[in-house]
Amino acid sequence: MSYRKDPRVDDYIDPLPEWQQAICHEVRELVHAADPEVVETIKRTVQPYFVLDGNICALLAAKTHVNVFLYDGGIVPDPEGIITGGHENKTGRTVAIHDGEKLNAPALLAMFEQIIANNRAGGWRKLKRES
């Protein structure tokens, strides 16, 4: 897949352990597969964010896992149960992937697509007010 890479995102991913690099690269590919207009950037000085009409997700490599922060206001369905944290969070939830775990790519891709659709419809805050 061809998309515009922000070299600062590579600067974040490249020094990580191999297993974390693999997860970050897979998430990066998935979010761009969800929509070719997704833009990657750095926020909070070092953290990779993927945006399109609002935040979609962010990456944070921790010691034992990689967190994928989903900015969905808790409204995107999770039928496969991949959300691991933030169930009561009002702005976003997390998917934590540990060393040796396989990422549920189809489920995460579907969530990215829904977040993008929600962003294009005015964002999750607007959608929550209207429901």
Image: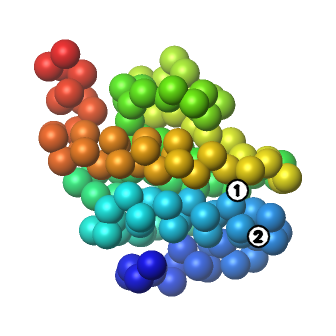
Please report contact status of discs 1 and 2: CB closer than 8 Å, yes or no.
Answer: yes
Between the residue at mark 1 and the residue at mark 2, the CA separation in whole angstroms equals: 8 Å
Compared to 11, does 128 lie above or below?
Answer: above
Query: Is the residue marked by circle 2 packed among few (<14), some (14-19), or many (20+) residues within 10 Å?
Result: some
Residue highlighted by disc 1: 61
Q: Nearer the viewer, residue 17 or 2?
A: 2
Compared to 54, does 28 lie above or below?
Answer: below
Helix, strand or loop at disc 2?
Answer: loop
Q: Nearer the viewer, residue 64 or 108?
A: 108
Answer left or right for 48 relative to 118: right
Q: Position of residue 126 (x, y in %)?
A: 18, 29
| Residue at the (39%, 79%) spot, across then down | 3
Q: Quadrant of the N terminus?
A: bottom left
Amino acid type at image mark 2: Leu
Residue 32 quadrant: bottom left
Amino acid type at image mark 1: Ala
